[in-house]
Amino acid sequence: MSEQPGSSRRDWPLWEVFVRARRGLAHQHVGSLHAPDAAMALRNARDVYTRRGEGVSIWVVPSAAITASSPDEKDPFFDPPQDKVYRHPTFYDVPEGAKHL
Amino acid sequence: MYGNDDTGTAGGAPGAQDRDAKRRFDQLIAADQRIEPRDWMPDAYRKTLIRQIAQHAHSEIIGMQPEGNWITRAPSLRRKAILMAKVQDEAGHGLYLYSAAETLGVDRSELLDLLHVGKQKYSSIFNYPTLTWADVGAIGWLVDGAAIMNQVPLCRCSYGPYARAMVRICKEESFHQRQGYDILYTLSHGTPAQKAMAQDAVNRYWWPSLMMFGPPDDASSHSAQSAAWGIKRFSNDELRQRFVDISVPQAGVLGLSLPDDDLRWNAERGHYDFGPIDWDEFARVIRGDGPCNAERMRHRRQAHDDGAWVREAAQAYADKRERKHSDKHEDKHEDKHEDRLRQAEARAS
């Protein structure tokens, strides 16, 4: 984004915030925030995203460090599994009488 | 910023991709699926969302002012702690929303600049003053109540990050509404003077709250397209009617009246009829001639300017740490290099 004329400001970098809701669960993306460094990002994430006991652990990751697949989720990138239906258990007919399969 | 492209997987002819992308967008909307930040979207969709989310974010942070006005004068420590938590929530809501707007490719500082020069708006309700403690209650009950009515359908908005922000906000808003109702209930069951104060607050906030749903459907310029895009799920008038219908019995429980002589149950419609809204007042306040427009903007700009040194200090500290960190790194490299030289010399001698 272009700087305002006469402004010497440099914006704080953006961080993505991941919160583990409780033990036994994976961290989940909850949102993002701006902070000058990792320590401030953590503190701000705590204040913004866990005011009501929503988490027991927080990760902050610089947004710029995330590499994403192409925006188009129907990309050929994701195609291969679609034609390998035999990877799903429902592909197979279970013979009558066979149990616990 | 929403992830960097892995250039290894990008490919295909751009022209054909654009056509496909437009078709895919339309299909997703038709199937009531969510649009995500990196999806292709029409410029007008992006612009509409930025305008709406920014206005919403601005409303959250400007909304801290009328309530912040009473933090130092809350009638008890308990009420004060609750009000502080509520005002802190509003700041958090602003942040969720600015973050959602940023996924559309704008910068938060850019949006704040637009607010500060008056090029983007916030909800006109916050241009009314909080004259008494009861006003804090009326804002919680009516203003937050109207906001919830508007916001719950936005949890299913077609733009993913906006919808997700609204889920978080709605959860927190119900605390806001109940604390307001609690304040009014306590006052309306207190001394006659306290009850009169509660009634006066409701009298002043009722009509502006009805205006929060925006102009009537036949005069609302953005509604049709927003509905087609799945941004807006219900019309302004539908939501307003729903708000009136649930508020009348709530006012009954408070033992307070609503300032509208035309307010009565219409059995045929199954809704409450209510009197005409003063849309001239609405237009006046939006235009900038409300009771507190100038004060709100002045205060916002000043808070932003007064906070500049904090932002700069935090940045300077981060820069210093980074410099130290990289110096240390270089030192280590040099140490290793020297070690190797010494070892080489020892072997040679």
Image (spheres, rainbow, N blue to C red):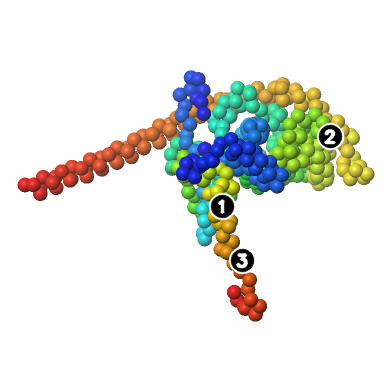
At label 1, which amino acid type do we have?
Answer: Asp
Query: Mark 2–mark 3 contact, CB under 8 Å?
Result: no
Residue A91: mark in rendering: 3
- Residue closest to the far right: B268
Residue B56 visible to the viewer: no
The residue beneath circle 1 is: A79
Residues tagged by mark 2 and mark 3 found on one chain of the structure:
no
Looking at the image, which residue is at 22% across and 44% down?
A: B336
Give the side of residue B244 with respect to residue B267, left or right: left
The answer to which image quadrant residue B317 occupies is: top left
Few, some or many residues within 10 Å of mark 2 (<14, 14–19, 20+): some
Q: Amino acid at mark 3?
A: Phe
Q: Secondary structure at mark 2?
A: loop
Name the chain under label 1.
A
Which residue is under mark 2? B259
Q: How many marks?
A: 3
| Both marks 1 and 2 on one chain | no
Give the image location of residue B90, x and y in percent. 62, 39
